[in-house]
Amino acid sequence: MACNKPKKTPGHKTKSHVVKACEKGKEKIVRFGQQGVKGAGKNPQTAKDKARKKSYYARHNAQDSKPGKMSARYWSHKVKW
């Protein structure tokens, strides 16, 4: 598996994506995203999707710190939201 290239995992029972995270010479397999749930996307169009995105970021403390590539939070923000 290539470094920092997320892939969908439709066969996994709980997580929707997997990535081999590589940073500063370290490697780690990170699974993220709830299976069967679609994120609101980078540019949500409807009020419902905008509210979902706002709630997601509030739950995951997104504005306080910048997560590293070794965290599921980083990949979830980058790929799904």
Image: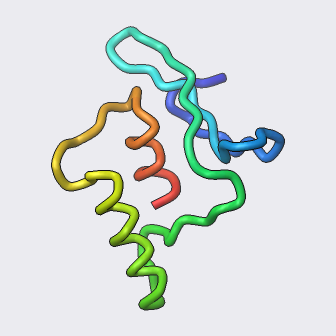
Residue 38: image x %, image y %?
A: 61, 65
Residue 40: image x %, image y %?
A: 50, 71
- Which residue lies most toward the front here? 59
Residue situated in front as seen by the camera: 48 or 66: 48
The quadrant the C terminus occupies is bottom left
Name above or below for residue 51 compared with residue 9: below
Image point (56%, 22%), residue name: 29
- Give the mark count: 0
Name above or below for residue 79 compared with residue 12: below
Name above or below for residue 14 compared with residue 34: above
Image point (47%, 48%), residue name: 76
- Which residue lies most toward the right here? 11
Task: Please identify the quarter of the rendering in which residue 15 is found.
Answer: top right
Image point (26%, 52%), residue name: 61
Image point (27%, 53%), residue name: 62
The quadrant the N terminus occupies is top right
Residue 31: image x %, image y %?
A: 58, 34
Q: Is residue 48 left or right of residue 8?
A: left
Q: Is residue 64 left or right of residue 38?
A: left
Residue 32: image x %, image y %?
A: 56, 41
Task: Please identify the quarter of the rendering in which residue 37 is found.
Answer: bottom right
Task: Please identify the quarter of the rendering in which residue 66 is found.
Answer: top left
- Which residue lies most toward the left here? 64
Residue situated in front as seen by the camera: 55 or 25: 55
Q: Is residue 44 left or right of residue 11?
A: left
Residue situated in front as seen by the camera: 64 or 21: 64
Name above or below for residue 41 compared with residue 30: below
